[in-house]
Image (cartoon, helix red, strand yellow):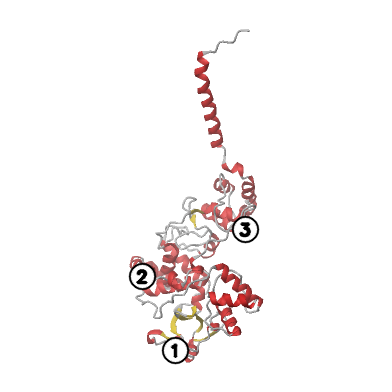
Amino acid sequence: MRAKRSNPLWSIVRPRLDCFVALLLAMTIAATPALSADTGFTNFVASLWPEAQRAGVSRAVFDRETRGLEPDYKLPDLLLPGRPKTGAPAQAEFVQVPADYVKEASIARLAAHGRTLMEQHAATLKAIEQRFGVPGTIILAIWGRETDYGRYALPYDGLRVLATQAYVGRRKDQYRGEFIEALKLIQNGDVTRKNLRTSWGGATGLTQFLPSELSKHGVDFDGDGHINIWTSVPDALASAAQQLKNKGWVPGLRWAYEVTAPGSADCTQGVPEVTKPITTWIHEGFSPVRRQRLTTAEQAQEASLLQPEGIYGPSFLTTKNYFVIKEYNFSDLYVLFVGHLADRMANGRPFVTPWSALTQLRSADVEAMQKHLTRLGLYSSKLDGKAGMQTRAALGAYQKKAGLKVDCWPSADVLRAMSAGR
C-alpha cells in the first residue's frame, strides 16, 4: 500500500491554524467574567436587592453598580473558609507608644499647614463654629489626622470593600447596611463610583466617614444640593463638626488640661468612671502646667484622669469633650493627637512633660494579661490586646494586690509575674 503524499499547502496552513485556535481559546478565556469563578459572591450581592429597594435604591442604580463587582479577598480582617484567620491590621493608635504616635515632627508639620488652612478657610470655619459650636482648630485637626488635609489618597474601591466585608467580614450585618448606604450616596449624586475611595474598613472622604455616619451627620454646607465630603472642604468640615455636636460637644469647653501629677497619685483612678471637679483634682495635687490659671467655671467642670503611659509621661485632666472626640476614633492616642494638634494651630506649645522611653508589648502579650486580669475579677472589658484606660487601671489594681510597683503599664516584668503566679 502506497503511503499518501503530504500536501505541501497543508504543512504551511496547519501550524497557522493551530496558532489561531489557541489564540481564539485564550481570548475566550480572557473574556470570561472573573465572577464566574465566584458565584457565591455574585449570588450574595444579588440577594441584597430587596433590602436596597426598601432603602430607596433604584433597580437601575443597583444593577449598574453591582454589574461585574468582584470581591477583594486580599482585605484584612476577613473570615475566609479554608484560609488562616487574618486579623485587622495593627492600628497605630493601639500598638505605638505615645512618643511614636504623637510625634513632635508630625504635629509641628501639620500645625504649620493647619495655620495656613485656617487663613484660607477663615470664613467657612467661623460659620461652622457659629452653627455647631466646634472650634475650627478641632475640625482642621481631624482633617489633618485622617487624610493629611486631603493629601493622602485612600487606596480602595469603596463599593468593592463594603460588599466584601458584608460577604465574608467579621461584621457582616453592619456592612450590609454600609453597602446599601453607599449605593444611596451614588444614586443621590453625592459621589461617583470612581471617587468613592475608602480605607480597608470602608471609611471615606476627607474626614473619613462610614456611609451610615454620613447619612446621620452629613451637611451640605456649600449649598450645592449634595453632601460632598470628597472634594468640598466646607461639606467635609461641617459634617465633622455636626458629628461632634450630635455626640455631645460642649461649646467653649477645652478637651483636656495637661497637669503635673503628685508623687502620691493613684494611677488606677485613670478611668472615665472616676470623675471629679477640676478644683478637687487641683486640691489633690494635680497642678496645671506652666502655672496656668483656670477660671472658676473651668475649675467647676467634671474631669477624668488620663495617664497614657501609666505613671510615666504626661498626665491630663480630660473633660466631656475629650470623650466626644473619642467617639470619632476610640483611641486615647487619637484624641491626644487631635487635641494637641488643635492647640498647636492656635499657637500652643509642646507638652511640658516629655513622653518616656517605654516600649509597647505585643498585642498577644497584652491580651494574655487581660485574660489573667479577667480571671482575677479585675478586668471586665474586651479582650483586644490594647492597653487602654481600663486595661491600665486593672494592671494597677493587680500590681497593688501582688505587691509590685504600681505604675499601670503593661511591661514584660508584669507579664512574667502573672505567668509565675499561675
Graded by Cα atoms within 10 Å as few (under 14), some (14 to 19) or many (20 or more), the crowding at tag 3 reads some
| Looking at the image, residue 295 lies above or below residue 26 | below
Query: Could you say whether the residue bearing mark 1 is in a helix, strand or loop?
Result: helix
Please indicate, yes or no, whether residue 406 appears anywhere in the rendered image: yes
Which of discs 2 and 3 lies nearer the camera? The answer is 2
The C terminus sits in image quarter: bottom right
Precedes in sequence: disc 2 or disc 3: 2
Q: According to the image, label 1 marks what residue?
A: 296
User: Quick check: marks 2 and 1 in contact, CB under 8 Å?
Assistant: no
Q: Nearer the viewer, residue 25 or 69?
A: 25
Q: According to the image, label 3 marks what residue?
A: 172
Q: Position of residue 200 (x, y in %)?
A: 52, 57
Name the amino acid, label 2.
Ala
Q: Nearer the viewer, residue 309 or 66?
A: 309
Q: How many marks?
A: 3
Q: CA distance from mark 2 to mark 1?
A: 32 Å
Q: According to the image, label 2 marks what residue?
A: 108
Precedes in sequence: disc 3 or disc 1: 3
